[in-house]
Amino acid sequence: MLLKTFGGSFAITAAGLVLAFLYGGTLGLAVVAVLAVLEISLSFDNAVVNAGVLGRMSRKWQRLFLTVGILVAVVGMRLLFPVVVVCVTAKLSPGEAYRLAMAGGDIHTPGTYASVLHEAHPAIAAFGGVFLLMLFLNYIFEERELTWLSWLERPLARIGRLKQVSVVVAAGALLLAADFLAPAGKPVSVLVSGALGLITYLLVSGLSELFDPDQPVAGDGGGRRGGAVVVAGKAAFALFLYLEVMDASFSFDGVIGAFAITSDPVVIAIGLGIGAAYIRAMTVFLVRNGTLNEYAYLEHGAQWAIGALAVLLLCTIRYEVPEIVTGLVGVGFIGTALVSSVVRNRRLSRGKPPATDLAAGSPRLTSAH
């Protein structure tokens, strides 16, 4: 199972390291290794959340997520996305942007590739921050049988009975960010980018609801797996789009943060691409091993990590937030949720109700979702 799931990632790692050495020598090899570790540490919460969606898709679409999806993640987000941002921001042609990228320089040198991308960061952070904030809010405002931080999640779920409350909160957060965090001359671009993030989330999530992914689709692997509904066809395609946009939002901080290490777009694409391959393989591993069902609070922890990441992304509109802080916050939430899940499983095995359920007064003690 391990080799079958991570075999492609191992192959990508070997090819990437060889390419990095041929391209940049020992230094290029070392920087690629650092970037790969950075991407993995920043994106583990991404893997957990993706697993919750991917588990509802047929094996065919899971394979597409690992193959076609990784091309989108590496070539699209890690290589082409920064170039497109530079083209739009600096009003350059793709060829000029590529030449600027290969010319080197750092974020403190005006006119360089890294500097132009750094200037565009407030708008990028607004888009990604609002999209991820909507993802978190729609999860936390939803009523569910099992809660992790019951003292907080249950009151929030009651507030969630107010329709579109997540849109109201996200829009309010965007207005505050544009007013108090946007640098001089940037409030409009922050507002527009954040609004695009909100619209993108509503559009993609609306597509998934339009195709009614809770209903299995005949053919293409649709049906049931382990008692859970598995979707295929148009419903799976809608979820696939949702995953790709969500992955893009997760990758913004890693792509921008990578320029603090190197301004070479080729090295960045190789390093972050290796990390992205492991995150996607880890997503499939979590799905096929039923990890989210076994450790019931793991998804809760990942969603709280997403909420923290969304807030941190919005904060980076004005302030520098070290990548180590982002990584530790995500690991902290997920690690705590994992420990809570283990404690819950032990209590259930002894015939005792979990402490969180006792605190909430819930009559249902064994349902994970």
Image: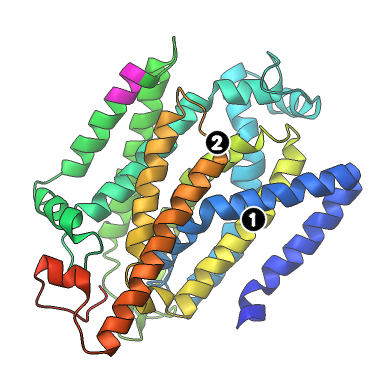
**Would you call the spot at circle 2 few (<14 residues within 10 Å), some (14-19), or many (20 or more)?**
few
Residue for point 42% across, 20% down: 189
User: Residue 179 colored magenta?
Assistant: yes
Residue at 41% from the left image edge and 30% from the top image edge: 315
Q: What kind of element bears circle 1?
A: helix
Image location of residue 22, percent across then percent down:
91, 49
Asked whether disc 2 touches disc 1, contact meaning CB atoms under 8 Å apart, the reply is no
Q: Which mark is residue 78?
A: none
x 68%, y 56%: residue:
274
Per the rendered image, the range of residues in magenta is 176-180
Inspect the magenta stretch and tell me whether residue 104 lies in it.
Answer: no
Q: Position of residue 300 (x, y in %)?
A: 32, 61
Q: CA distance from mark 2 to mark 1?
A: 18 Å
What residue is pinned by disc 1?
275
Q: How is the image coloured?
A: rainbow
**Horizontal side, residue 122 vs residue 24: left or right:** left
The dot on residue 322 is 2
Q: Residues within 10 Å of mark 1 (few under 14, many from 20)?
A: many
